[in-house]
Image: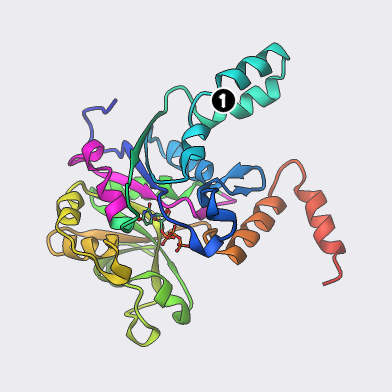
Amino acid sequence: MFTDNEQEKIQIAVFPVAGFGTRFLPATKSTPKEMLPVVDKPLIQYAVEEAYDAGIRNMVFITGRSKWSITEHYDFAYELETELEKRGKKEFMTIVDRIRPRDMNVMFIRQERAMGLGHAVLCSEPIVRNRPFAVLLADDLIYNHYGIQVLKQMCAIYERNQQGVIGVQTVPYEHTHRYGIITAGSRLDDRTYRIEDIVEKPAVEEAPSDLAVIGRYILPGRIMQILANTQTGAGGEIQLTDAIKVLLKDKTILAYRFEGERYDCGDKLGYLQANVQMGIHNRDFGEDFKEYLRSLDL
Ligand code: UTP
């Protein structure tokens, strides 16, 4: 399952999907927010495709209560597949096949209590062990409409530097209280910085910068030992940001200002924006959709 060059390439992606999604109630009462569709695909599928496109074949989902539909989405649907084959529906068979390519491994670990993102990541330790790995938060839909997808961009940086990489984006200062915010140190290039410090959800007057951590990480396996010793922080949860802060004491971690559009699909407005943007860029009906939008008397 894992090859020997584990130092050079990222082989595991972790998808924490055990959160409550309270900002998206009532839809998320029984439906995981990661299964909400943007145009025609659930959010989780965008994230998994991004990881697959970056060369990763081992997908680890950290699930919780009411998340069974994610497991179903990544299981083989024997009846559906047989039926489509019998009816000669090739086009639909391809759509179903693409969800889970044959060379992709999927693994599920249950986070029994939603004790925070850091805790969710720690749940993947029995699989990740001491290997470097990627973390993707599917509710951050990030799409580069014009080129290479973001995790692939980040894997290239990891492979060049053999150092952890965290995806960041500039945000308005009045929004810093929603994110982990980094203090950027020296630059490697226009988009890549060494991280000096990181703080979870600072108030605007305490924010060290406007560079916010967005849901894409490449982390060294060492973070697991740190997470195991991390106490609950902001919101009574085990925060990944707190563990990264400790990691920075003995490892260089890079911040990368990625190329791509990010839509916060854990938030209702962000989700609507994602649907409009992905609709506009849709190859089959994008032009018709634009036409429709233009016709609206707003
Ligand atoms: P969020 O902060 O977006 O939390 O978590 P949430 O609970 O999903 O959403 P709200 O704030 O209640 O609306 C960031 C990511 O971490 C996962 C979530 O599923 C999401 O992808 N997560 C969070 C877990 O897997 N477990 C947790 O205990 C907390």
| Residue at left offset 75%, top offset 41% | 284
154 shown above or below 96: below
Residue with the most extreme bottom position: 205
Residue type at mark 1: give it: Asp
Q: Nearer the viewer, residue 266 or 72?
A: 72
Task: Tell me, yes or no, whether the highlighted magenta stretch contains residue 123.
Answer: yes
Residue 7 found in image quarter:
top left
- Name the spot of residue 51 as percent of width and height, x first: 43, 41
Q: Does ligand 1 reach within 8 Å of label 1's beta carbon?
A: no
Q: Nearer the viewer, residue 165 or 71?
A: 71
Write the start and end of the magenta stretch as one range: 119-146
Indicate the quadrant containing the N terminus: top left, top right, bottom left or bottom right: top left
Q: Is residue 44 left or right of residue 289?
A: left
Residue wearing tag 1:
97
Looking at the rendered structure, the secondary structure element under dot 1 is helix
- Name the spot of residue 36 as percent of width and height, x first: 58, 49
| Residue at left offset 36%, top offset 78% | 209
Q: Is residue 21 visible?
A: yes
